[in-house]
Amino acid sequence: MKIGFLSLAFISCAFTVFAQQSDSMLMEKAKTFMLQGDYENASLIYSRLHTAKPNNYDITKGYVFVSYLKKDYQTALENGKNLLDLPTVDVQTFQIMANVFSALDNRKELEKLYKKSIEKFPNSGVLKSEYGEFLAKKGKPEAAIAMWESGIKSEPSIAANYYFAAKYYSNFGNPIWTVIYGETFINIERLTARTTEAKNLLLKNYKLLYTNADAFANIEKNGDAFTKTVAQLLSAQATLTIEGITPTTLAAIRSNMLAAWYANKYNEKYPFYLFDYLKGLEQNKVFSAYNHWLFGAANPTEYSTWTAANKQQNDAFFQLYRTSIFLPVLNQYYAH
């Protein structure tokens, strides 16, 4: 009897392990279907898994996500809303359900969801970037920028908050924060359509600084101590724009500005990761190549000519850039 009991227990245990492995294998198969754009087959698998195990969080979450992708929003809503109150709920689930409410154009529930998500995950830069975007679309730009800057403070490595903040400050006439947040974004998210957009925004606002007679004066009048200091150092390089505002002249302007920043020990008063990173590029003798990459999109012919004439430096820059990681850290001037 004892041996028989142990055998049954072993078989039961083995069956449970096999079932768990089967669930895992089926979920992986469903994810493969999703990556292939075959949402019907993915939904078929998740539906059967969910029927068998309706209380399994990962299965339900996967079923909600594929239902959303399949545009079966009601099924996604019915199964997903119950996940939001569970102690195991994660950031991704809030993101998925935000997409569901957005697809259903249920803005009231969407805002309630974002508030609930921030309460649950007060340090999530991803959720704050999305909530800020929602607030901006709702016509609340001041609340939006507060959310994005809060996201920058709580999770500095999330690119989207810098992207949205840079666009906000460009629209509201603050070119210093536009170029700082824009360049930070570009160095985190390097190879997307938004990167190209941010590069153009960067060049546009550098031109604004040197072509708008009131730009530096407005910063001197309305900026905080940090932006005033940056503006003063940039303003001192105005004579370098006599040949236009190009990648070459901007490289010289920014190199001189960095030299003055560290010579005056502003790095101790205003610790700032972006400037330290740029200083590292200078020390590796690739700062000029970096600037041409940063601003060259505006004039592809000039960029192509420069890279051909400076191949060694350009190759060295890309070798370094491909292997370096830009990870902004929290400091007092990443958000203000």
Image (cartoon, helix red, strand yellow):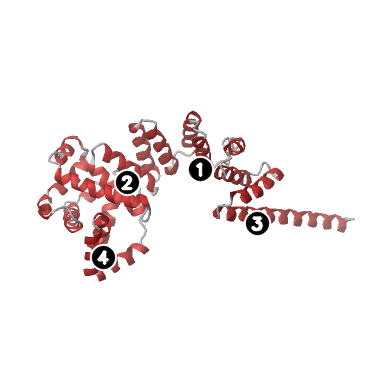
Determine whether label 4 and label 3 are within 8 Å by CB: no
The vertical placement of 305 against 92, above or below, is: below
Which residue is disc 3 drawn over?
25
Q: In the image, is 160 to the left or to the right of 38? A: left
User: Quick check: 179 left or right of 41?
Assistant: left
Q: Amino acid at mark 1?
A: Val
Numbered disc 3: secondary structure: helix
Kind of residue sitting beneath label 2 = Asn
- The location of residue 98, given as percent across then percent down, is 50, 38
* Mark 1 or mark 3, whichever is nearer to me: 3
The secondary element bearing badge 4 is classed as loop
The answer to whether residue 271 is visible is: no
| Distance (Cα) linking label 2 and label 4 | 25 Å
Can you tell which mark lies on residue 91?
1
Query: What secondary structure is found at the residue carrying circle 1?
Result: helix
- Circle nearer the N terminus (2, 4): 4
Indicate the quadrant containing the C terminus: top left, top right, bottom left or bottom right: top left
